[in-house]
Image: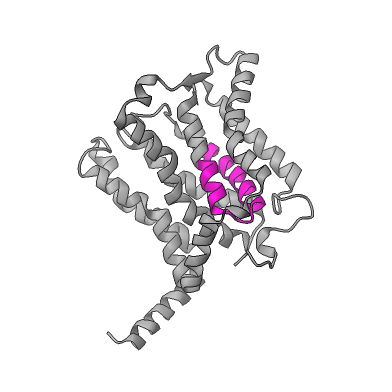
Amino acid sequence: MSGEHRHRQAGRLGHVAHAATPWGFPILYLGWAFLFWAPIVVSDESVWSFPNVGLFLVGGLSPLLAGLLLAWLTRGWEGLRDLGTRLIEVGRIEPRWWLVIVLYWPLFNLLLAGGALLFGVTAEPLEFISTDRLFDPVALFSLVAFAFVFPVVEEIGLRGYWLDRLQERWSALVAGTINGTAWAIWHAPFVLFSGYYANTTFEPELSWFVPMLVLDTIILVWVYNNTRRSILAVLMFHALGNMTGELMGFAPEMYPFILSGYALVAVVLVAGWSPESLRGWGVQSPLAETTSWEL
């Protein structure tokens, strides 16, 4: 195949990717994942057994693969460099937002635990990680992977690429709701995977897990838009949320009380920072600004 022919093919694919925006991403994102995950669900074997673990890992790459592929097809190497820059550029995140990223989840868990005690939801709202798990190499590896590795795979494509495409068309609130709904659909099979949460303190049910992920996305959009579209910021926020849940997680009876906490935070953010941009009333979305760091 000649170089000219390959160039024409790449050009045609780029036109298709542009025409499919913003729906090309969820088609690839969900389609790729479910193609590999469906056999795991019907097998009724542990997700960590062979070959299920391989199918899980390959399917789990879908947000990263979809984001990188579409960034390259629509903007070429410039699109990939933009994602890389926003992944490693620490200067996008102001000190006050580092405080938000580091402190938000511990404070959220503690405040909800206090509310649960106040309203009599449970006498023991929090479950702290045991020393046995902390010093078990397998359990510790699972904890770190759950907390940090998966957000790397998810945030680059899901927020770094697709959230921008959605915010080019709709408000931050609408874009976040669409983004979060797809994210929740992608996570739904996790509840069906046998043994997936065996080494964690988290045992979700779809009735509260799905809306919680949508509301969580509104919070992530707030962080993303206020850190100049920093992928690093939402990655760390996501990862530290996972880590907090493992070190200082909620007792099972805390659900769906926790969902009300997510809803309250989302309402406060929308009312305080505006549904249009989640950056403040009268403040534009970061995509509407033309500055040196944007593209």
Q: Is residue 74 visible?
A: no
Q: Against 1, is 155 above or below?
A: above
Q: Residue at x 65, y 15 (%)?
A: 118
The colour scheme used here is one colour
Q: Is residue 231 above or below residue 44?
A: below
Q: Residue furthest left?
A: 50
- Disc tally is 0
Residue at image coords 25%, 35%: 46
Would residue 56 be counted in the magenta stretch? Answer: no
| Percent x, y of residue 187 | 43, 43
- Where, quadrant-wise, is the C terminus in this rendering? bottom right
Q: Position of residue 96 (x, y in %)?
A: 68, 43
Q: Nearer the viewer, residue 245 or 218?
A: 245
Describe residue 60's horizontal placement relative to residue 226 as left or right.
left
**Vertical order, 151 against 115 (above or below):** below
Residue 171 lies, in percent from the top left, at 67, 56
Left or right: residue 140 compared with residue 124: left
| Residue at image location 70% in from the left, 41% down from the top | 269
Which picture quadrant has residue 190?
top left
Left or right relative to 196: residue 15? right
Question: At 78% from the left edge and 51% from the top edge, which residue is drawn?
Answer: 281
Q: Main secondary structure of the magenta part?
A: helix
- Residue 288 at what x, y percent from top left? 69, 64
Instruction: Please say if 37 is above or below 46.
Output: below
Judge whether residue 216 is colored magenta: yes
Q: Look at the image and tell me whether residue 259 can be seen.
A: yes
Q: Give the residues drawn in magenta, as a range.
A: 211-238
Q: Quadrant of the N terminus?
A: bottom left
